[in-house]
Amino acid sequence: MSLKIPAWVGDTLTPVEKLEVHRRGLRHKAISVFVMAGDRVLLQRRALGKYHTPGLWANTCCTHPHWDEAPEACAMRRLREELGIEGLTLTRRDRIEYRAEVGQGLIEHEVVDLFTAEAPVDLPLAPNPEEVCETAWMALSTLQARIAEAPERFTPWLRIYLRDHAGRLFPNLGLRAEA
């Protein structure tokens, strides 16, 4: 059975098979979560078996909601499924839209609900190896520097979030979108 996600076909939100959405570059719903410990963010390196952007570093969690699934419920579900994280309080930071090529002729054109959550650095993790091959906590300033040095090691959406939306995502850290 194929997974269908909410995507716009013309002006109508419709359940469409996920790979087809990315092949056609259809605008679709998504969520992204940044779990924070002060100025440090929990990153995940995408599993090598992922059909796009395998092995690249991304924010804590990102996915597409099921049809009629609320963004916050989706975010909580994927934190649990990808990293074994439960019980955090999510704060909705923004809704943005971006479009990016993600390799192999695939396109992410997402309308993304962005969330943050505060957690301790010793937060228990149980990464799902089908989703995540590595995790790391990193200061946002270090992350921005590493992205500048080697952008190809990071997912396009993470680069976009930090370049264009850092101030809205992390309002208490004094970060600004890069010029």
Image (tube, rainbow, N blue to C red):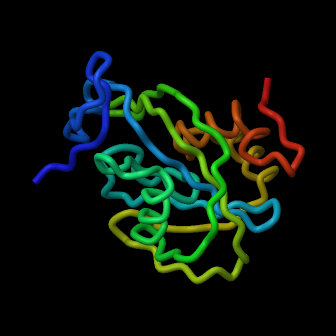
Q: Quadrant of residue 18?
A: top left
- Foreground residue among 98 and 15: 15
Q: Where 47 falls versus 10 (above or below)? A: below
Q: Quadrant of residue 48?
A: bottom left
- Foreground residue among 51 and 83: 83
Image quarter of the N terminus: bottom left
- Foreground residue among 68 and 166: 68
Give the left or right position of residue 97, taking residue 168 as reference: left
Image quarter of the C terminus: top right
Q: Residue at x 38, y 47 (%)?
A: 64
Q: Residue at x 56, y 68 (%)?
A: 135
Q: Residue at x 83, y 35 (%)?
A: 176
Give the left or right position of residue 119, taking residue 101 as reference: right
Give the left or right position of residue 40, taking residue 111 as reference: right
Q: Position of residue 69 (x, y in %)?
A: 36, 52
Q: Position of residue 55 (x, y in %)?
A: 45, 54
Q: Where 115 falls versus 157 (above or below)? A: below
Q: Position of residue 112 (x, y in %)?
A: 51, 39
| Residue at the farthest top position | 10
Q: Residue at x 31, y 50 (%)?
A: 66
Q: Position of residue 11 (x, y in %)?
A: 32, 18
